[in-house]
Image: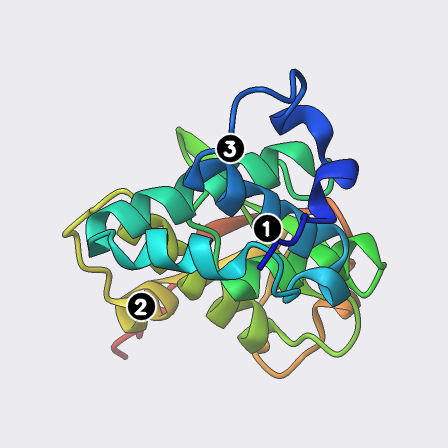
């Protein structure tokens, strides 16, 4: 039986410019992954699928992980909307970035003394102070995982000791919408120590 000719070649000719060098399995994998991102309805076409799958089955877990990460890095770098995302991006981060582009969410920057600001994404409408705190916790946890940090943070202690502040407004009420405190896209949020009320003995 005559081998089928892939329709991917005319779409992505950069892998066969001289038409003499046969593509490696890595090239085939990258073509399929890139085609999936550009035209999902063509991603599962069976052309070249059998030979590629056979090659992938020969790889161990480490090789598959390296291949997936390197392919993802190339995809993210090629997309202007996703180029700022890390290569080990989570589904939540991708959806959050898309929501920002669509105007459904906003990005706020959490200032942390001498450290770099931590950017977090929250829905533009309906986000309470409590929601913002939970988002900050998830962002910090993810950052620690990527840095392989073993430092444990007691968030119960953090929120018992600190409030969040936007400009001159202290976000004291967890049930209040952040929009009521003037928080908008690009706003800077910082931690401010709670003032303890001293009891006086008569």
* In the image: residue 49, left or right of residue 141: right
Per the image, label 1 sits on a secondary structure element best described as helix
| Percent of width and height locating residue 172 | 56, 71
Q: Is residue 92 above or below residue 16?
A: below
Residue at 21% x, 46% y: name it. Answer: 148
> CA–CA distance between discs 1 and 2?
43 Å
Residue at 58% x, 19% y: name it. Answer: 20
Tag 1 near tag 3, CB within 8 Å: no
Count of numbered circles on the image: 3
Q: Is residue 172 visible?
A: no
Q: Quadrant of the C terminus?
A: bottom left
> CA–CA distance between discs 1 and 3?
12 Å
* In the image: residue 141, left or right of residue 170: left
Q: Residue under circle 2?
A: 155
Dot 1 or dot 3: first in sequence order is 3
Q: Residue under circle 1?
A: 32
Closest to the camera, between mark 2 and mark 3, is 3
Where residue 83 sits, quadrant-wise, is: top right
| Residue farthest toward the right in the current orientation of the protein | 103
Tag 2 near tag 3, CB within 8 Å: no
Where residue 115 sits, quadrant-wise, is: top left
| Residue farthest toward the front in the current orientation of the protein | 1
| Percent of width and height locating residue 120 | 57, 54
Residue at 19% x, 47% y: name it. Answer: 149
Q: Residue under circle 3?
A: 23
Label 1 crowd bin: few (<14), some (14–19), many (20+), radius 10 Å: many
Dot 2 or dot 3: first in sequence order is 3
């Amino acid at each position: 039986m005559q081998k089928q000719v892939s329709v991917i070649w005319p779409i992505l000719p950069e892998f066969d410019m001289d038409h003499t060098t046969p593509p490696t399995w890595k090239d085939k994998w990258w073509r399929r992954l890139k085609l999936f991102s550009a035209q999902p309805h063509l991603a599962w076409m069976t052309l070249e699928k059998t030979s590629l799958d056979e090659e992938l089955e020969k790889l161990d877990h480490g090789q598959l992980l390296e291949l997936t990460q390197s392919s993802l890095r190339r995809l993210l770098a090629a997309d202007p909307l996703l180029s700022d995302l890390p290569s080990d991006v989570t589904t939540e981060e991708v959806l959050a970035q898309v929501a920002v582009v669509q105007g459904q969410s906003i990005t706020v920057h959490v200032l942390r003394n001498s450290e770099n600001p931590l950017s977090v994404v929250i829905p533009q409408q309906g986000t309470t102070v409590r929601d913002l705190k939970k988002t900050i916790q998830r962002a910090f946890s993810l950052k620690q995982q990527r840095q392989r940090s073993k430092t444990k943070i007691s968030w119960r202690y953090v929120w018992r000791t600190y409030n969040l502040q936007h400009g001159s407004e202290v976000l004291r009420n967890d049930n209040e919408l952040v929009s009521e405190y003037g928080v908008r896209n690009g706003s800077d949020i910082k931690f401010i120590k709670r003032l303890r009320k001293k009891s006086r003995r008569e």
